[in-house]
Image (cartoon, helix red, strand yellow):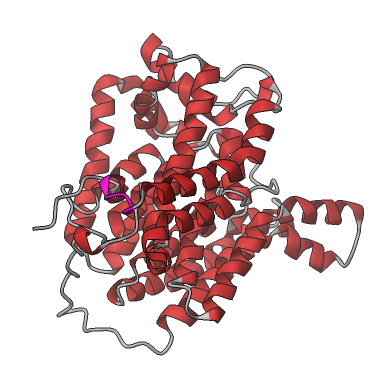
Amino acid sequence: MPRTLGPLEGLRQRLPANPRWWSAGVALLLLASVPGVRQYLVHWPDEIWQVDLEVYREGAHSLLLGRPVYDYLTSAPQYLPMTYPPFSALLGLPLLAVPFGVAGWLWTAFQLWLLWITVGMAFRPLLQRFGHRSALAQGAVAGVLIQLQPLQEGIRFGQVNAILVALCLADVVRTGQRRWPMGSLVGIAAAVKLTPAVFWVHWATARRWRVLAVSVGTAAAATLLTALVAPSSTSAYWTQALLDPGRLGPNNGTSNQSIRGMLLRVMGDTNPALSLTWLVLVLAVGVFGYWLAARLHRLGEDVAVVGTVGFLAVLISPVSWVHHLHWGVVVIAALVGDGRQWRRVAAGALTAVVLYFKLPSTGTSMVLSGRGPYWFARVVENSYCLLAVLALAAMWWFLVRGRSVPDARTEPEPAAAPVESAEVPAG
């Protein structure tokens, strides 16, 4: 009988036969993370050090002190407000157990650990080809991906995207038997930050009603639990803070790589056609993206489902900062597959190359300085948004085009693979 797995199923999978490959893989990841850690934790100015982590920590501190969570601002010069649901402040209480400086280092280590797990789940078909050296390959892949700008920004700000991606990936990808109902981890992620709720639309379009009910119910339970602990903060979030887009920062800033952010920069925020154009584009991208995700599900391409829905969240959200493209890790894995098709590997590599360079800020500099053709500067400025659209098209081209799918009315749920047949460690 295969043994039962807990949440984030890869955490307790067996290690390779030779632990030195596992140690070498971890060492590769740690070595590759040194430049980013040194820049953003050692040499970064104190006044902007781990600013988003400070927001989460102060949100938890507000709960503990009984002060209004959404009225309190962090210290100068940032003056940042809490923007996430109050459940995230509740989960942030352990951050108060250590000094802020220690919390920043621990949070960074936690992000690296979650990257290791995410790579183990998402790149499983590729890593299995390395046999007992799969852990070394896992470390090498993770070491390359940590260089991408969304992950570097996650370290810089102390962000939560590594948690959200790992939770959603572990919930959707079938790599073993579960002790938790499918949909519950996405529900927890949606209670922490609203964007993972895009999976609810996917499950509705794929007619997976029980998974949808579990996920929505889990998020509702977490929200109600928080309401019992902090009723005033819960009310303030759902009636005031959630409806205030100004709390998120300047929506037309270069770092906002959503469709709306691109339109704000190209058309201007006073253009009367802005809202209608945004609605049309969001509708078009949403219809194609959710159709693609449902098709990928029926084809058994679960990693691609997560990547597709994750990039949909980036595109259709009003505000999607660069670090939100952490979903790119999963998209690259879906494109690369087992690494046997060079065109897919090239598509994944090109995605990684684009996310490696700071193209949006480079494009803004080109626009302001007048260097190069104006249209080209705008393309570079909005490159991450355009990349997300092209990545959806690439997943259709490589994973869906020309493949037949079973009848949805008779489609069985794929059986979970027993752990004993797996060679790739995810943790």
Q: Nearer the viewer, residue 123 or 303?
A: 123
Which residue appears at 50% of the width and 14% of the height?
Answer: 99
Instruction: Please tell me whether residue 206 is drawn above or below residue 39 in the rendered image.
Output: below
Which residue appears at 73% of the width and 56% of the height?
Answer: 359
Which residue appears at 21% of the width and 54% of the height?
Answer: 182
Q: Nearer the viewer, residue 115 or 13?
A: 13
Is residue 208 highlighted in magenta?
A: no
Where residue 277 sits, quadrant-wise, is: bottom right
Task: Answer with left or right where residue 219 lies relative to residue 102.
Answer: left
**From where the camera sits, is residue 160 visible?**
no
Residue 326, horizontal then vertical, whole percent: 52, 51
**From where the camera sits, is residue 112 visible?**
yes
Instruction: Please tell me whether residue 388 is drawn above or below residue 101 in the rendered image.
Output: below
Residue 286, horizontal then vertical, whole percent: 45, 66
Task: Answer with left or right where residue 48 lies relative to residue 320.
Answer: right
For the view shown, which residue lies furthest in the top direction?
65
The total number of labels drawn is: 0
Q: In which quadrant of the rendered image does the N terminus lie?
A: bottom left
Instruction: Please tell me whether residue 76 is drawn above or below residue 107 in the rendered image.
Output: above
Residue 50, horizontal then vertical, whole percent: 59, 28
Task: Answer with left or right where residue 319 lies relative to residue 12.
Answer: right
* Magenta region: 12-17
Assign the magenta stretch its main secondary structure.
loop
Task: Answer with left or right where residue 360 lies relative to residue 63.
Answer: right
Which residue appears at 21% of the width and 84% of the height?
Answer: 407
Residue 155, horizontal then vertical, whole percent: 57, 37
